[in-house]
Structures are given as C-alpha cells and as structure tokens.
Image (spheres, rainbow, N blue to C red):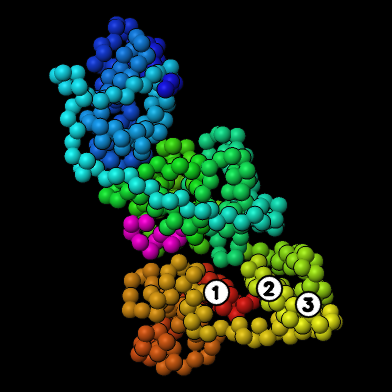
C-alpha cells in the first residue's frame, strides 16, 4: 500500500533535522515510531496501544521509502490485520508520503517462521450476523416538517450528508441530536441515513445495543465496524449499563480515528444525563450537540391535513383543529388517525356523514381516557430526566433521583388532588411525612426558582396533554 509522505526533506521539516547530515536508519525509525505512537494515544487508551502497537518491530528505509512491520507471531498478525490495520495506516498517512508498507513475520535460524504460540492466548474474532437496518422509506428530508426553530439542526444534517456523500471527512463526530419524545429525532436520523444509503455508502441505523454486538469482543477489545456511517437512535439507554457506556466511548474513538460518521439521538442533552460516565460524557462533549424542538401547532396542523387527504378520511377543518389541539407531537396525531381509519372501515356501510360525526366522539372520548394517573405522571418525569420510573418510585436517595421524585410527588398532589396516604402508597409505601416534605420542598423551590417553576409547569402540561 502507498501512503502519503516519507522523503528526506519531509523528515528535515517535520522533526527539526536541519543539519543535512545523513540520517541514521535507527534514528529515523525511532522518531517515526514515536510519532505514530503519540497519534494513537490521542485516540486510544494507553493499555490498548501497549497491547497491539508496542510489540511491533518497525524499521524505515528512507532511501527506498519503505516501512517494514514485523509481527511477534502469526496470531498477532491476524488480529492486527483484521482490527487495527485501518487505524494504523490512516495515522501513518498523515505523517508520510509515498511510503510502501510491508508486513512480515519473524523468521527462525533456518529461515522458517518462528513457532506459533498457543491460539488460546487470543480471542477469536467472531462477528455476529449482521443486523438488518430499521430504516423506513418515509424517513426523508422531504417528509420532515419543520419551521424556523428547527432550522439549525436541519441545516447541520444537510451539510453533514453533503460532505460525507462527497467522500469528505464528516464535519462533526459525534453529532448528537437531542430533544423531547416526539420532536422528530428518529425521522431526522433516518432521513440522513436514507440519503447516505442512496450514495452507495455502508450505513447502519438502529439501537445502540444491536450495533455494539458488532464491535465488542470482550476484555476491552474492539473490532473496527464495517459501516461508513453509523446512526444510533435512543442512545440514552446506554446510561443503564456501564459496559454499554464503555463500548460507546470506544466506538467514538474508533470513528474519530478512522473518519467514520457517528450520529446519535438522546432524549435530553448528554450533559443532563445523570448516569453517564465522565469518560463517555467528555467524548460526547467533543462533538456537536443540537436540540430539536417539538413541532408547534402550525406544523401539526399541516401534517394532520396531509394525512387526512392521503387517507381520504373526510374530516372537517374544525375537527382537524380539535385533534391537533389535543396532541403534543406527530405520534399522537398518527395514533388518532389510526383509530379513525379503523373506525371508518368498520362503519363504512353507514355512510360518510356518520363517520365525520363519530370521529369527533372518538377524539373527545380519547381525551377523557387520557386523563393523567400517578403512573403516567411518573413516566413523564422519568422521561424528561432520563431515569427509570422504577427508580423514582423505589428507595434510591441520590441527587439524580431525589429531584425527579419530588416533582412527581408534587404533580400527583397538584394535578390529581390525591391524599398524602394515596401518594405515599404509590411511591413505594412511603410515610405521609415524606410526602409532606416533598410537597413543601417543591413549593419553596417554585417560589424562589423561576426555571424550576417553568420546568414543573411544562411537565404538568405534558401530563395533561396540553401545549
């Protein structure tokens, strides 16, 4: 393979050898290897570099522009060529020009390969079967409805697709889209993935757990993914397991070193995920994070009108407006329209006029059935803070859980008017004095902290199904 730089003038300029004396072979090799190692340490943990780079016997012939890499033994070579070679050559290409790399095994006294070590010393690289992508055809930029408050995320998504399509390095890795449920993160991720998939790039779109199986070999070892572009939806689930966080941090390092595109979606800004490790949080912070806002009423109205026309539901404008007012996002509209479509198929014999009337009855009934419950309030609070409902109801007392629990208890009291005993019974059979403490604490916070007041008010509106 021919890489980019290795000639005398390059070494004089790069390493400060200005004396024009012939460079000794050992000096050239030593400095070259040290510079490669320095670059690797910026992308990989030190123990990984010691494991698969330090044992290499590297020699550089400056006159012939040749680098010879000798492996300790056969199985080391197999692992290196399979997993490490792309990163090694990518870094070497930044340092050298017109370089030919030759890979070899050591030879014994008789000119034969050295004895092979026990294969059990190394893990076999067994890649699982490739997971099918979860891409949907309707996830396109053309179908993504937006207004000015989401101009920036959409512009960044378009720029990223354009640069990667032109085989340029992605401008941002990792690129993080975050926003509340129903803001369109999955759609925008899917639109980017579909656009790049049409450019003959190898794309993965799906959940983190499905993809991590493809790169994790165990014991801190990772395989380079085959995909050029990786889109991981609902990446906040990685916060539940320390191992998944370690794997995701390693994946970010791999993508940065190899020039791959990595795009992730989170329900909230990664900095606000309380259970993320510092190692993963710092790597996510090195990329670009942009927020997607929920679609406002005008966008939801346009969407509902398009669906009404597409499925020929015959809904009157005032009924569509009523439907849109009762929903917070596109998924809510889809749910209503799915029920209306099913109802229409059942009563089609009664005529179109009956369908329009009964549609309003269904919408009003759904609104009545959608009144909040303690469980739905806890779910809304848990989703906002990226914690589990079980933790809010359970016995954990750390700061990451205490505030969501106080808010959930306050909303159960404020929105539902439940008694202290009823609330305590739902929240893990807590004593009524604990419930009084939470309610009083929130009352003081709401009086003194405007941001907390707005946050609690917004979550309360979500629980009630309002704007």
Instruction: Determine which residue is flagged by label 2.
Output: 338
Instruction: Determine which residue is flagged by label 3.
Output: 319
Residue at figure coordinates x 65%, y 73% from the top left? 335
Q: Quadrant of the N terminus?
A: top left
Q: Main secondary structure of the magenta part?
A: helix
150 or 219, nearer to the observer: 219
Q: At which x and y percent is residue 408?
A: 47, 79
Q: Earlier in the sequence, mark 3 or mark 1?
A: 3
Rounded to the nearest angstrom, the CA distance separating label 2 from label 3 is 15 Å
Label for residue 430?
none
Q: Secondary structure at mark 1?
A: helix
Instruction: Determine which residue is flagged by label 1.
Output: 459
The magenta segment: 235-244
Rounded to the nearest angstrom, the CA distance separating label 3 from label 1 is 26 Å
Q: Quadrant of the C terminus?
A: bottom right
Q: Residues within 10 Å of mark 2 (few under 14, many from 20)?
A: few
Q: Earlier in the sequence, mark 2 or mark 1?
A: 2
Q: Residues within 10 Å of mark 3 (few under 14, many from 20)?
A: some
Rounded to the nearest angstrom, the CA distance separating label 2 from label 1 is 26 Å
Q: Quadrant of residue 4?
A: top left
Residue at figure coordinates x 50%, y 69% from the top left? 384
């Amino acid at each position: 393979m021919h890489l980019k730089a290795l000639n005398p003038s390059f070494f004089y300029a790069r390493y400060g050898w200005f004396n024009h004396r012939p460079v000794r072979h050992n000096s050239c090799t030593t400095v070259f290897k040290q510079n490669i190692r320095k670059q690797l340490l910026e992308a990989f943990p030190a123990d990984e570099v010691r494991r698969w780079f330090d044992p290499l016997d590297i020699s550089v012939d400056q006159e012939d522009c040749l680098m010879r890499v000798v492996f300790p033994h056969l199985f080391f070579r197999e692992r290196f060529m399979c997993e490490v070679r792309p990163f090694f050559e990518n870094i070497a290409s930044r340092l050298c020009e017109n370089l030919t790399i030759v890979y070899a095994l050591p030879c014994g006294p008789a000119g034969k390969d050295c004895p092979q070590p026990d294969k059990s010393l190394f893990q076999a690289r067994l890649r699982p079967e490739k997971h099918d992508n979860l891409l949907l055809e309707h996830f396109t930029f053309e179908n993504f409805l937006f207004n000015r408050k989401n101009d920036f995320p959409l512009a960044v998504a378009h720029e990223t697709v354009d640069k990667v399509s032109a085989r340029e390095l992605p401008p941002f890795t990792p690129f993080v889209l975050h926003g509340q449920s129903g803001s369109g993160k999955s759609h925008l991720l899917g639109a980017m993935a579909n656009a790049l998939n049409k450019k003959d790039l190898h794309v993965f779109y799906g959940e983190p757990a499905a993809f991590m199986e493809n790169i994790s070999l165990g014991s801190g070892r990772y395989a380079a993914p085959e995909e050029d572009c990786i889109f991981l939806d609902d990446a906040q689930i990685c916060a539940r397991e320390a191992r998944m966080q370690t794997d995701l941090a390693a994946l970010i390092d791999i993508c940065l070193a190899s020039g791959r595109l990595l795009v992730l979606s989170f329900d909230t800004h990664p900095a606000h995920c309380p259970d993320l490790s510092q190692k993963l949080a710092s790597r996510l912070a090195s990329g670009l994070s942009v927020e997607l806002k929920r679609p406002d009423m005008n966008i939801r109205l346009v969407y509902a009108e398009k669906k009404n026309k597409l499925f020929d539901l015959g809904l009157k404008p005032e009924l569509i407006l009523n439907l849109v007012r009762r929903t917070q996002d596109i998924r809510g509209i889809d749910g209503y329209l799915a029920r209306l479509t099913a109802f229409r198929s059942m009563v089609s014999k009664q005529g179109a006029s009956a369908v329009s009337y009964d549609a309003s009855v269904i919408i009003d009934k759904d609104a009545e059935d959608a009144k909040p419950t303690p469980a739905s309030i806890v779910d809304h609070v848990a989703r906002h803070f990226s914690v589990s409902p079980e933790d809010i109801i359970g016995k954990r007392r750390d700061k990451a859980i205490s505030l969501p629990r106080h808010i959930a208890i306050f909303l159960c009291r404020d929105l539902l008017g439940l008694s202290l005993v009823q609330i305590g019974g739902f929240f893990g059979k807590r004593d009524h004095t604990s419930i009084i403490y939470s309610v009083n604490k929130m009352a003081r916070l709401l009086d003194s902290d405007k941001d907390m007041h707005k946050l609690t008010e917004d979550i309360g509106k979500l629980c009630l199904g309002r704007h």
